[in-house]
Every structure is written in C-alpha cells, then in structure tokens.
Image: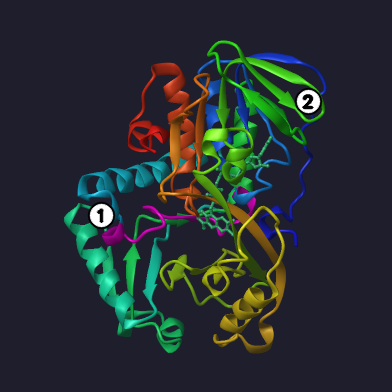
Amino acid sequence: MRPYWLDIPHRPSPALSRDLHVDVVVIGAGLCGSSAALHLAQQGLSVALLEGGHIASSATGRNAGFILQGTAERYDRAVEVMGRERARTVHALSLENHQAMAQAIQTHSLDCAYQKRGSLQLASSAEEETELTAACALLNEDGFEARLIPKERLPPALAQTGHQLGVFLPGDGEVQPARFTRGIVNAARQAGCTVFENTRVSTLDAQQPGHVQVHTQAGHSVHASLAILATNARAGELSDWLVDKVDPVRGQMLATAPLPTLFNAPIYANHGYDYWRQTPEGRVVLGGWRNLDPSTEVGHEESLHPGIQERMSDFLRRFPWKEQLRVTHRWSGTMGFSRDGLPLVGPLPGQPGALCGVGFTGHGFGFAFLAGQALAAMVQDGQHAMCTALDPRRF
Ligand SMILES: Cc1cc2nc3c(=O)[nH]c(=O)nc-3n(C[C@H](O)[C@H](O)[C@H](O)COP(=O)(O)OP(=O)(O)OC[C@H]3O[C@@H](n4cnc5c(N)ncnc54)[C@H](O)[C@@H]3O)c2cc1C
C-alpha cells in the first residue's frame, strides 16, 4: 500500500505542541501548501506550515508525477467549456507553472529525477482520434506546441496495442513528486518557515483578517493575520463554503520493478483515464482505469480496488516484458475534483482572512506550484493572474 514515491526515508518535523503567533498559517503540505509556504517565507513573513500527516503524504506523493499542460479536459473541450480566451489563459498558466517548477529545481538544487521529455496523448478509438486531432489543431492555432504522431510513427509497443494516433506535447515533463515537494519544504525551512507534521487542524476561524485563529486536534492554537487553506480533497472540512465545490475522488496506481525501456515520455490514453510512464531506472508507474467503477472510486479512503488493480496488471501483460514483469507497489490516492473542473485559487468566500488553493482535479502538478506562488503574491501585492483566472468567487 505504500506509494513507490514515499518508499524513501523521511524524518518528520515535530508536531505542534504549543500555541503560536505568526504572520501567515498555511494548512496542508502537499504541493500547493508547500509552495505557498516557501514563497511567503521568501517574502520575509513568519510562516507556520501545518500538515495533518506527513509532507506529500496525500495526493502529492501518490500520483504519477506527470507535469502536464492544461486541465484534465482536452484542449478542444476546454475551449468549448471555457471559451477560447479563458482556455488559452488557463493553458498558458499551466506552462508557466512548469517553468516555475523547473526554475525552483535549479535554484534549490532539488534531487527529484526531473525530466522534460514531453508527453504523449494516445487515441484509443476512432472517436478519440478525431477529438485529439481537433485539440492538436486548436493548440497550434493558439500558439502552443503540439504534434500529431500517426500510427506508423508511434513507438512499436504502442501501435501493437491498438493505439491509432498520438499527440506529442514537447513542453511536458515528469518528476519524483515526493522528492520535489520535500525539497520545496526544505527550502521553505531555510527561508525561515516553521513546519509541523502530524498536526491536524480541526477548525479555521478567519472571519476577521488580522485576527485569524486555527485550532489543532491536539488542542493548540495558531494566531495569524492570514490563513492559506491548501487541503485539497479535504477542503470542505475546514470551510462550509467549499463543501459542495470540491469532491474527493480516488485513483489507483502501481509500480513495477525496473524493466527494459519501451516508453520515453509520460503517456495518457482513453480520454486521460489511463496513464503510465517509465522512471529513469525503468520502473513502470501506471495509474487510472477509474472509469471501470466510478461510483466506488470516491471518498477519502486510500484503499485498493482489486478489480481495477487487476485490469491494470492485465494491461501491462500486453507488452513484451513477459517473466521480467513484477509489480512491487500498489497504492491509491485521493484527488480533489472541483465541480467545474478548474482549480480554486484566491480569496476564500465566507472567510475574509483566508485564501485557498484547492480542487486541482487530477492535474495538480500542472497548476499547484504556481498556485502557491500566486497566493503568496496575493498576500504581498493583492493580485496575481492565476488568482484572477481561477478566482473561487466564480462559483
Ligand atoms: C492517483 C493519482 C494520480 C495523479 N496523477 C497526477 C499526475 O500525474 N499529474 C498531475 O498533475 N496530477 C496528478 N494527480 C493530482 C495531483 O497529485 C494533485 O492535484 C496535487 O498533488 C494536489 O496537491 P495539493 O497540495 O492540492 O493536495 P494534497 O497533496 O492532497 O495536499 C493536501 C495536504 O493537506 C493535508 N490536510 C488535509 N486536511 C488537513 C487538516 N485538517 N489539517 C492539516 N493538514 C491537512 C493533507 O494531509 C495533505 O498532505 C494525481 C492524483 C492521484 C491521487
């Protein structure tokens, strides 16, 4: 059940064991909260980062580590739903997010197996072929790099498994997500942020900016001028307003022992439901197949779905690894799906002393690092383009 990415040593920071006064309290040390804490501390503010479990122990350490551009919707669908201008803006923000992550990796010398090899979207049916072709054309029209790959130029292993066509997006990348996030938290510590793990927040009172109070399950309080809520799928537990905006949705994952390399970039197929990659050491990390049983893949329980896990193993058996194929890790994780498919980044309605970065809808590595940076900019300057485009008050 332990995610492959978290199968590395970690010495947790101590839990909060006294009351505290800081400028900003950040709740949740996933990608978004960790990034917010770093950027706030870099502004010279006193910051406390409170995490109910461990750093990256939720979605951030349980995902596939793809750094993809755009939302969970294909670009043609995004244009249909959001309109051309807004779809282009949101897409450009995800590319800016990737750039910011790459910059942070360089600045803080993060050891996180980052690679920028692009990504490949595959069509699994004639219908999807038409859709991907349309999405590719629209991306190009809007100035984003995307290339159609006909079946005969797909890697042989993929053409043999019935995929007809691909769209290659050279701007995408991949990372060891837990190492990246722990590295960001270390950088935040070095910038002066105080980190508390195993510190679950039970209430957030941010009715009055300047006089925010956070209470922990262990009975301690943090007094702050402002709070940042970065609790993803659990957002509704600390904000009544978010209860019907962000829903917990479970995803299944597995990882294999190292195998000969067949895939040189993250791949997603079947409308994004199925996705896989090979790590630098050759392990296949594979996830998805949620559409086989969407009604049970909801809620906060990080349990395995035997039927879906079996189908994922079956899929791997289609490739010519034969007896070398060995699954070493199986796990699941909970995503925060927003009701309109877009993250909520900015002022938290009903709590004027709080900002939030939640609801990344299965694509948090495309948005959440920049979201943390944007929330820090909101604290300092009162504005950021991401908080305009993804303002929670749109609901
Ligand atoms: C199986 C799976 C595969 C995925 N694959 C990808 C992918 O390849 N690419 C991609 O872009 N995205 C992917 N995602 C989504 C991505 O992982 C998330 O969107 C992203 O990690 C969200 O980051 P976050 O900081 O918002 O949330 P989280 O990582 O969930 O962090 C929230 C933190 O808040 C803490 N918390 C919650 N409540 C409290 C409380 N009351 N008090 C204190 N702390 C609290 C939690 O313990 C948690 O650590 C995937 C997700 C899953 C589950």
Q: Residue at x 63, y 36 (%)?
A: 28
Task: Say which mark, if any, is on residue 4.
Answer: none
Whether label 2 lies within 8 Å of ligand 1 gets the answer no
Name which residue type carries label 2: Leu
Residue 22, quarter of the rendered image: top right
Question: Residue 105's spot in the image, x, y percent?
Answer: 51, 41
Please say if 257 is above or below 114.
Answer: below
Closer to us: 214 or 278? 214
Query: Residue 147 placed where, x, y %?
Result: 27, 67
Tell me the residue at 65%/72% (across/down).
258
The stretch of residues the image draws in magenta is 60-77
**Residue 302 at least partly seen:** yes
The one nearer the camera, 139 or 177, is: 139
Label 1 amino acid? Val
The residue where tag 2 is placed is 16
Is residue 35 found left or right of 198 in the rendered image? left
Residue underneath mark 1: 79
Secondary structure category for the residue under label 1: helix
From the viewer's perspective, is residue 74 above or below residue 152? above
Left or right of 117 in this view: 141: left
Mark 1, other Cα within 10 Å: few <14 / some 14–19 / many ≥20: some
Q: Is residue 176 visible?
A: no
